[in-house]
Image (cartoon, helix red, strand yellow):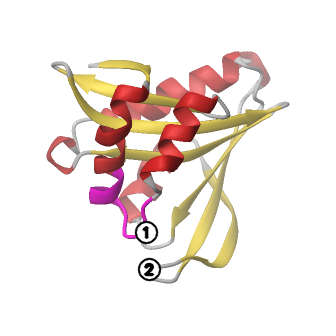
Amino acid sequence: MQIRPANAADVDLIHGIEVASFSDPWKREGFRDLILGGSATVVVAEADGVVVGFAVTYAAADEAEIANVAVVDAARRRGIGRTLLDWVIAAVVRGGAKTVFLEVRDANVAARTLYAACGFAEVARRRHYYRDPVEDAIVMCLKIPAALR
């Protein structure tokens, strides 16, 4: 498997994974704008030349946010999500991040378990944050130890 920066040719694939993964997906144009505009880092995971997952991160000063991670259903439970997380965490740490945040649906136990295994801790709850269906978001935080920065 390879992790690489997303490009314009990946937009439809990324959006397809997004629509299949989330009940309230981001719009295709949003991904296009992020990739072409450079306001976020968007990476894809490829297995045998096929895009099987992606991640979106934002960084400012010494903080970063993992805004989105998704893997195609047929490729889940193979470590791709973990590989994407490890890659983007390492990238934002190289960029100076001391703290990494993310939000996850309260009911998404699989994702919460993965994030906890990566060192994230629950720090807050945002009531009724998600729509379709309405659900709380759990805010999770990873503090990067000084020795790893």
Q: Position of residue 23 (x, y in %)?
A: 37, 70
Q: Is residue 94 left or right of residue 74?
A: right
Residue 131 higher or lower than 141, as above or below:
below
Hey, what amino acid is under mark 2?
Asp
Which residue corresponds to the image point at 49% horizontal and 39% vertical from the top-left? 32
Hey, what amino acid is under mark 1?
Asp
Comparing 78 with 11, the one in front is: 11
* Quadrant in the picture for residue 103: bottom right
Extreme-right residue of the structure: 61
Residue 116 higher or lower than 55, as above or below:
below
Label 1 crowding class (10 Å Cα cut-off): few <14, some 14-19, many 20+? few
Query: Does residue 22 appear in the picture of this structure?
Result: yes
- Secondary structure of the residue carrying tag 1 is loop
Query: Does residue 118 appear in the picture of this structure?
Result: no
Residue 85 bears which disc, if any?
A: none
Which residue corresponds to the image point at 79% horizontal and 22% vertical from the top-left? 146
Which residue corresponds to the image point at 27% horizontal and 58% vertical from the top-left? 20
Q: Position of residue 81 (x, y in %)?
A: 36, 39
- Secondary structure of the residue carrying tag 2 is loop
Residue 24 bears which disc, if any?
A: 1
Which residue corresponds to the image point at 58% horizontal and 22% vertical from the top-left? 90
In the rendered image, residue 21 lying in the magenta stretch gets the answer yes
Q: Do the numbered discs 1 and 2 sit on residues whose CB atoms are within 8 Å?
A: yes
Q: Position of residue 28 (x, y in %)?
A: 42, 50
Which quarter of the rendering shows the C terminus? top right
Q: Which residue is mark 2?
A: 132
Q: Is residue 119 left or right of residue 14?
A: right
Read off the magenta span. 18-25
Q: Earlier in the sequence, mark 1 or mark 2?
A: 1
Q: Position of residue 85 (x, y in %)?
A: 47, 34
